[in-house]
Image: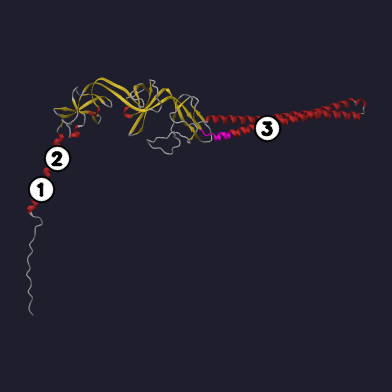
């Protein structure tokens, strides 16, 4: 048996995990990338530290003059001491409006402005009038019965008196009669006199009883008449009438809302609404004493005080200004992000055609400095309680601290600059940076 030839084994050559040339290229690329990043960071930092060129930025030259703090308030016109018409204080729950003049209607004294449904009061009036009729009938019946009883009592009284007279006549015959008959006559006289006395007492008691019954019925009738007067008064009170001439202002219905959220406006009263006693349905302001009820932001509260002079412009009367005076300044209220306060201004001029509810704007000059350096409000910046501007020097903007003397919505009175200095109207950092 011959042996099979075996194949020759080829030795394996070991391979390198990463070529040396490729490692050097990797490290060189990484180093170049790091150097490029460091260079870019350095260039960016250098540019941030450089002053900003002033070529393309709007500037303002600091001026010398007068700075006034002028507040602008928006609101609506209203009257002083309005004639308020409220639902009458009648028990039995709410009432329903069956008649109502439109908002803004011109009314005259005595004119019916609103009327409530008086069905329940009409029913109560009918009941009271029926009670009065019944009581009067009872009084008439009691008086008739008393008169009939008086006739019977008069007849009984005459009869008793006749019996006494007859007994007295019989007693006169006693001297000629036997002692027993004379004694019987005396007993009859005593019995007749006693019966007369008892009858007189009974008649007096019956008369007092009849008079008492009549008084009871008269009291019932008086009570029923009071109910009639009350019902008629309530029916008359169901009509709300104006006491002065003017324009009608229908009030918002605040009692039929089941939820409330900020900014919600309540609808005004209209026909069919339920109104509870004491709720003001409408009012007629006094047009001879118009007021502007305005609202301002919280930041203006420190400037405003009662007695400040103002000028009011009514939207419906363009081109016409009215002198006014602040008469009341309220407290701050509202949400933290929208704090406001209310103020009231009295209109000093009488302008025909003005109505309550018209929109108006008030311009109130509260403070002024006549001879100061000033700049626009947008040119003064502040951080951490300090104020500064960006002053242009040699074509660059430098941050310059200033002191604010007075600030209005458009101007700022300040010190720390000179008249004619050029300052930036915008923040130069937004355009590429500024020197601190």
Q: Earlier in the sequence, mark 1 or mark 3?
A: 1
- N-terminal label among 1 and 2: 1
Magenta residues? 116-124
Q: Secondary structure at mark 2?
A: helix
x, y percent for residue 280: 46, 30
Real-space Cα distance between discs 1 and 3?
A: 126 Å
Q: Residue furthest bottom?
A: 1
Q: Quadrant of residue 164?
A: top right
Q: Identify the residue at horizontal 10%, vertical 50% (top origin).
A: 26
Q: How far is disc 2 from disc 3 in space, using C-alphas?
A: 114 Å
Q: CA distance from mark 1 to mark 2?
A: 18 Å
Residue 140 in percent (x, y) is at: 69, 30
Q: Which residue is mark 2?
A: 41
Q: In this view of the protein, can residue 289 be seen by the observer? A: yes
Check disc 1 and report the residue beneath it.
Answer: 29
- Taking 428 as reference, is 62 above or below it? above
| Residue at figure coordinates x 31%, y 22% from the top left | 366
Q: Which residue is mark 3?
A: 138
For residue 347, what is the image quadrant?
top left
Q: Residue 240 at what x, y percent from top left? A: 50, 29
Residue 153 image-quadrant placement: top right
């Amino acid at each position: 048996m011959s042996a099979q030839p075996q194949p020759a084994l080829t030795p394996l050559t070991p391979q390198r995990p990463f070529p040396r040339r490729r490692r050097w290229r990797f490290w060189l690329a990484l180093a170049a990338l790091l150097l490029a990043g460091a260079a870019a960071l350095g260039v960016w930092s250098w540019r941030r530290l450089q002053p900003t060129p002033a070529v393309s930025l709007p500037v303002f030259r600091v001026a010398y003059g007068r700075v006034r703090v002028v507040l602008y308030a928006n609101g609506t016109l209203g009257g002083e001491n309005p004639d308020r018409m409220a639902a009458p204080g009648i028990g039995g729950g709410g009432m329903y409006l069956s008649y109502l003049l439109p908002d803004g209607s011109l009314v005259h004294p005595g004119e019916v402005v609103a009327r409530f449904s008086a069905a329940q009061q009409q029913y109560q009036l009918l009941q009271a009038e029926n009670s009065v009729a019944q009581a009067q009938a009872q009084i008439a019946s009691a008086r008739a019965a008393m008169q009939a009883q008086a006739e019977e009592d008069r007849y009984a009284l005459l009869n008793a008196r006749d019996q006494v007279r007859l007994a007295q006549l019989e007693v006169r015959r006693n001297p000629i009669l036997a002692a027993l008959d004379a004694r019987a006559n005396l007993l009859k006289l005593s019995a007749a006199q006693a019966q007369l006395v008892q009858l007189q007492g009974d008649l007096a008691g019956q008369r007092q009883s009849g008079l008492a019954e009549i008084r009871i019925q008269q009291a019932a009738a008086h009570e029923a008449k009071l109910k009639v007067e009350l019902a008629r008064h309530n029916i008359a009170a169901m009509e709300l009438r104006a006491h002065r001439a003017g324009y009608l202002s229908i009030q918002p219905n605040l009692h039929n809302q089941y939820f409330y959220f900020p900014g919600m406006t309540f609808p005004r009263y209209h026909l069919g609404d339920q109104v509870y006693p004491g709720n003001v349905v409408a009012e007629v302001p006094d047009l001879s004493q118009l007021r502007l009820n305005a609202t301002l932001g919280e930041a203006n509260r420190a400037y405003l005080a009662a007695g400040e002079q103002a000028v009011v412009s009514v939207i419906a009367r363009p081109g016409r200004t009215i002198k006014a005076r602040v008469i009341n300044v309220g407290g701050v209220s509202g949400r933290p992000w929208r704090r406001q306060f209310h103020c009231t201004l009295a209109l000093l001029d009488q302008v025909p055609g003005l109505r309550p509810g018209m929109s108006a704007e008030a311009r109130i000059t509260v403070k002024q400095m006549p001879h100061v350096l000033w700049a626009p409000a947008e040119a003064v910046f502040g951080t951490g309680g300090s104020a500064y501007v960006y002053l242009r020097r040699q074509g660059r903007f430098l941050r310059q601290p200033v002191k604010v003397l007075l600030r209005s919505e458009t101007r700022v009175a300040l010190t720390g600059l000179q008249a004619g200095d050029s300052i930036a109207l915008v923040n130069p950092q937004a355009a590429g940076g500024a020197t601190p």
